[in-house]
Image (cartoon, rainbow, N blue to C red):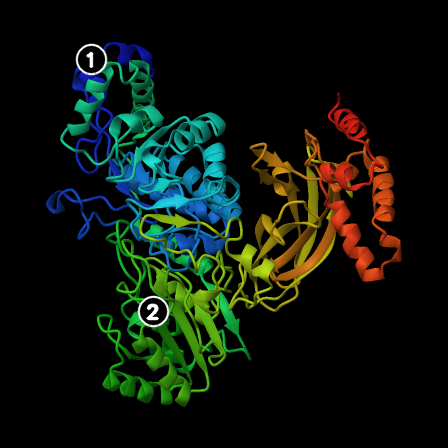
Amino acid sequence: MQRNIKDIVRTMTLEEKASLCSGLDFWHTKSVDRVGIPSIMMTDGPHGMRKATEETGDLGLNASVPATCFPSGVGLAASWNRELIENVGRALGREAQAENVGILLGPAVNIKRSPLCGRNFEYFSEDPYLTGEIAKHHIRGIQSEGVGTSIKHFAANNQEKLRMTINAVVDERPLREIYLAGFETAVRESQPWTVMCAYNRLNGVYCAENEWLLTTVLKKEWGHTGIVVTDWGACNDRVAGLAAGQELEMPGNGGITDVDIVRAVKSGQLDVTILDRAVERLLDVTFRAIDGHRPDVKFDATAHHRIARDTAAECMVLLKNEDGALPLARKGTVAFIGEFARTPRYQGGGSSHMNPTRIDSAVEEAQALIGSGGSISFAPGYTLENSAPEPALIAEAVKVAKSADAAVVFIGLTDQFESEGFDRSHMEIPASHTALLDAILAVQSHVVVVLSNGSPIEMPWVSRPGAILESYLGGQAWGGAVADILFGVTSPSGKLAETFPERIQDNPSYLSFPGDGRNVEYREGVFVGYRYYDKKLFKPLFPFGHGLSYAEFQYSDLKLSSSRIKDSDELGVTVRITNIGKVVGKEIVQLYVEDIESTVIRPVRELKGFQKIGLKPGESKQVSFTLSKRSFAYWDQPTSGWRVESGEFHISIGSSSRDIRCTGSVTVESSFRVDTHFDLNSTLMDVSCHPAGAQFAEQVRKGFMAHLGAGSLDPVGALMFEAMVNEMPLRNIVRMGGGQISSETMQGLIAQLNGG
């Protein structure tokens, strides 16, 4: 339906316009019936719609309308499957349509800075490229159904500790390269209807009123056309927030801050044109939701459960598989040990906790899968409420495991150990789970561990079981998906979207997380996750991008479209992948870029491309990538822009960040020209790097070395003097050179180098 939004705004009173800038209640925007502006509804929904029922009131934390629960963000990212993510998004969009929900609050794309962050289960990755790609396709899927999204939490919301007041202190380079890059990709390439600003401060200013973040970067640089909505309760100063680019405060507050806006306009503190622009954006999103709604839409809960099962299987990561421990034979007796096998932990705790349409248990699904050819025995081993070992339950589990051909031990993190609202203090699993595993390993030689957790855990027992399957928080169809993987119906194909360190002390943020109560300093800079472990030559427990398969893949025939390009050119990369195994499988082919020599400290390699492909035994496929300037660039703080330095770059293709299978080389010519200004504090080395000063610098170097008597020194002394002279400021060349170079001559050289 065509409307002239500017005309509508012109007919509104000041009070009506101000009223639209805050919610009606917990989930709805306000309407202005006089001019035909309706109310729309928002709900939580990163991995499933959480629409509150009328009986539960505003929050809906205890009960909500039944909806399909898909794997949480940590699992979705581990699929590395753009098409799959978009398909999940479409299913989420259809369910929102069926319930007349205008905007789903998600996806959550904050970077996993520390394994301890309580909300990591909801976030995608430690890597901004992977994060951006997953977010982009998630948003496209939902919005293709006429339902908006709210990408969150913008920005640097990387902990739960004091999240409403903490000040994240982050230099612009890591902000741009790590913490904003995922948002940037999603905004530029999928245009989420709304962006949810975070609770925290960023470099001293609340995100909800940070003009640099909300207007300079988001609206002007990235071209966001939607609205900024606060996280629920994130508004600090409503007028300052509106002026900074924050259009909608949620939840509703009874109109308290609407009065502040009216007062600010009447007093001249706030220009009414700022309010008008905000209302125009609000109306554009509102009418998009109204026009996109299709009241006849229904969703097939059974079909969506099937999507959830297939998705969960692709999200699971086979961390270890020795001596053919998996897949399990579909005969004999397999003991399923651990309460999670019967009562799965399939989603995280907090605002995204939803009411699934059904829940599959691994015990029941496994028995249905293997049929009469075998049997599944079960023992709980622990209770969900108690983290202390319970001897009677462990004794029962040992008895069951002893009499079985193999034992699958289901352990991980309970809701008490990780949830929105608090950060973990360690990476350990409950003592009851560890004690159970130890007891089973003592009596059974064929042990498989299935993990249910939303973040990395320590595994001092990692060498003992034959196989370890990371199932993450797999959604309502987790039980069936686990059975499919364990018994070989599906070959595992997920890969880690985060590094698993051996211990929390190895993590780069360890010394500065979660801050001093007022500030949290991101001292590790760009060295987050694998970027840090690779640079420090630390061997993690499991590296970024790691994941095994029942198939086996061979990499060959890497080709680059050119050996030399300009930074404005694109580079084509192809590689051939062959399934040399015996079963159908999917491989995630990862492309990393490495700057061989740089004037700034850069990571060893960075993910800049990936493709997930399926191959039958003996089948080969060529995988193609296209790299652009951004693939080779870093954020240059002095010039506030993306810069590529001239030189050699390695293009590495592999199965993980530590499993590189083939490497090529390209020389990139930078278009960046340094506007260098020389003065008496410039060094001789600075001058020698300038074409017009190189010959002069060499002559001065030789003369100065001779003047200092360096020729009579031993080799070590000569090296020391040469290094000292190279780094000596030009003023000292004049003062200490014994009159070889006059002040006038030096000033003339400086003027010449500066173009004078």
Disc 1 element: loop
Q: Is residue 275 above or below residue 606?
A: above
- The spot of residue 711 in percent (x, y) is 88, 54
| Residue lying furthest front | 738
The quarter of the picture where residue 615 lies is bottom right
Q: Amino acid at mark 1?
A: Thr
Measure the alpha-carbon separation of dots 1 and 2: 59 Å
- The spot of residue 712 in percent (x, y) is 88, 57
Instruction: Tell me if I can see residue 639 in this picture.
Output: yes
Q: Residues within 10 Å of mark 2 (few under 14, many from 20)?
A: many
Q: Quadrant of the N terminus?
A: top left
Nearer-N-terminus badge (1/2): 1
Q: Are marks 1 and 2 in contact (CB under 8 Å)?
A: no
Q: Which mark is residue 362?
A: 2
Q: Is residue 112 above or below residue 229?
A: below
Q: Which mark is residue 13?
A: 1
Q: Camera-side residue: 205 or 485? A: 205
Query: Is 329 left or right of 375, judged from the image as shown?
Result: right
Q: Which residue sits at x=33%, y=62%?
A: 424
Query: Is 689 left or right of 62, judged from the image as shown?
Result: right
Q: Which residue sits at x=80%, y=61%?
A: 716
Q: Amino acid at mark 2?
A: Ala
- The spot of residue 367 in percent (x, y) is 35, 73
Q: Which residue sits at x=25%, y=29%?
A: 238
Q: Camera-side residue: 304 or 499? A: 499
Q: Quadrant of the C terminus?
A: top right
Q: Which residue sits at x=24%, y=82%?
A: 390
